[in-house]
Amino acid sequence: MKGFTGFKGFRGFRGFAGSGLFVALVLVLSVEASTQSVRLKPDTTSTPPDILITRQLAESEHLSVGSVVTIAIDPAGDRAREFRIAGIYEPTPNPSRLGVVPREVRLHLPDLLDLTRPTGGVPGTEYVSSINVALTDPNDAAAFANDVNARMPGVVALPSSQAAGSAGPFRVLERFHLAIAVVTIIAATVFLLALTIMLVDERRQTVGVLRLIGLPVRRILIQIFIEGVIVAAAGAAFGLLLAVASERLINGFFQWKYDTALVFVRITRDVAVTCTSIAVPLGAAATVVASWALLRRSGLRLVRR
Amino acid sequence: MNALGFAWRSLVRQPARAALGILGVAAVGALLFDMLLLSQGLITSMRDLLDRYGWDIRVVAGELPRQGPRIRDGVTASETIAMLPSVSGVLLVRVADAKIDRPSGTALNASFQGVDVRTSAGTGVARRPPWTILRGRDAAGPGEVVISESIASQAHLAPGASLMLRPSCVSEHEALPPTTMRVSGIAEFPFASETEDTIGGSFAALRNACSGNVGDEVDVLLVTSRSDADVTAAAIRAARPDLNAMTNDDVVGRLQQTGFSYFRQISTVLTAVTVSFAVLLITVLLTVSVNQRLGEIAALRALGFSRMRVVKDVLSESALIVGIGGLLSLPLGLLLATGLDDILKGMPGIPAELHFFVFERGALAIHLSLLLATALIAALYPMRIVSSLPIAATLRDEVIG
């Protein structure tokens, strides 16, 4: 939704539509079909206006395209109207509503306003909760938002990139996952050091012989470093392959669990590059650090003579 | 010397690798411990929070408190419910948005909780409000309120000070005249988030601030039952079928089914990954260690150490690494949990008193069991190596090598 600007708290949007402030206006209004807010009852006696319903609602209420339902905005069923299901859609995944089954209905705006307008209300004076605006140039989002805020007191316009706020739940989750990643890296580094110390120790005699035949410490260290880089690169590649393989598994599980099309794990190029740029230097450095203690000893001591 | 003592000497002989192995287990163990605390922590914390204030049942018009429409005839509904024989008392809670004017700086956005009590004995019966007084005293009458610590610090208010607020009682676009209220105390609001500024007072105080523009609507009715909460909830549903009466268990159950389950799932996945990681690494550590000491082990066998004894030595070594690392992981894990809890509590709308990581004996027991299993599984392969070690061939290879 980059480039879209949303603003809230606006009355009499029809007048605003004529002001020419924006290029395209997209209104998306939905009514939740929970038992408390909207009541649906199958009906087959008339040919009423069209609506769309979510796949989840269709499945839970056994509705299909062509079914006629009655919608009311309160549990008592006052001012109920009939609608025909023209289509069933997969709702856009909404991370902030994870775990909530999207039982939603989409109506044409005039139908929704007719349905929800208070008794005696004048058409054209209704509220809309938010307006999404598509700009011809998405880079103008900030300037456009400032313009609307200046011209229309009481209306809050925000570029989509700021709409979630700095403390949105998924920003917090991102920080949480980062913290876990840091702990994992620390644990892995410690283990890596222990392993490399053992592996280097295993080659104590070989290194001792190389020292005795005259190879300088620097030369051996470079060789160990190159070995470390190769092993770390192979390890990182294996790790990435494992991550890619588990990506589908994890997404499949959570998508099934929450009945959503939301993607939970995505191995992007940036993620792969970040992981590799941490893992390879870390592996190579661990090898060199572990070897350094060994190389400080004399050749004779290393071959135990 | 027994197997444990022998394993200890083996570790001490190689202090660097032993220390690193133990530190690695401590770090992985800390993460594992935290994931176990996370798996049920939020639910345990929420249950504790709900039970702490003594209300057994929450009655709302929607599915969850403050996530649906208000109860239109809330005052009437509270009186009907209060008259039920199994109900001890009902606390009406009406929430309005309010702006608090400050001498300097922008106005603070706050929520104003107006409460009132209904019992079968009538109104005015003392009942604990949904907040805890930290300083000063509770609000009394239509002109007094209590405020959160956050408001007190931002607006430089103390008990006895005057507070000017402009509430929006029916819709957020109302422009009501400012009202001056007296701050009687500073309170902690258990269900308010750390960033949420909250004011509390009587229903009369809210009505006063709203210039009477609140009607009979309430957001939630908090009910204390005389007996079993489920029976009382059923009685409320029978009396008012249009309302949703939920016991504390129902609320926790609903939260478990929705967003909170994400943390349980993520903790399960990370627990599995962490345990696999620990098993793999300790197996490699022990295997490499054993491979380096094959000659030594063969010599011990030749000196009369039984096959079972050398297997026990390896198992003891594994147990020592995992055991010491596991013990270290407990304080490390609690420290890490504090940091992670602070991060997650940054989520909007999370009550300040709610915690994601809660210590439970059950979690500790599972943690220790998993570490025990890790020590055992990680030692299986190296144990197999030493148990099937050909003594003569190994000694010969060692001498020739």
Image (spheres, rainbow, N blue to C red):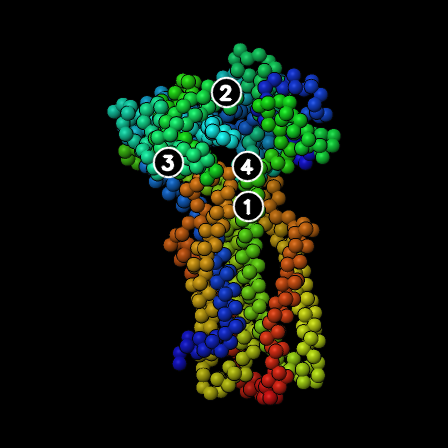
Does residue B221 appear in the picture of this structure?
no
- The image shows residue B345 at horizontal and vertical percentages of 48, 44
Give the SS element for disc 2: loop
Picture disc at residue A173: 1
For label 3, the crowd category at 10 Å Cα-Cα, with few meaning under 14, some 14 to 19 and many 20 or more, is many
Residue sitting at 54 percent across and 28 percent down?
Answer: A32
Give the SS element for disc 4: helix
Where, quadrant-wise, is the N terminus of chain A in this rendering?
top right
The chain containing the residue under callout 1 comes to: A
Q: Are marks 2 and 1 in contact (CB under 8 Å)?
A: no
- Same chain? Circles 2 and 1: no
- Same chain? Circles 4 and 1: yes
Q: Closer to the camera: disc 4 or disc 1?
A: 1
The chain containing the residue under callout 4 comes to: A
- The image shows residue A176 at horizontal and vertical percentages of 54, 49
Q: Which residue is mark 3?
A: B187
Q: Are marks 3 and 4 in contact (CB under 8 Å)?
A: no
**A57 w.r.t. A166: above or below:** above
Picture disc at residue A97: 4
The chain containing the residue under callout 3 comes to: B
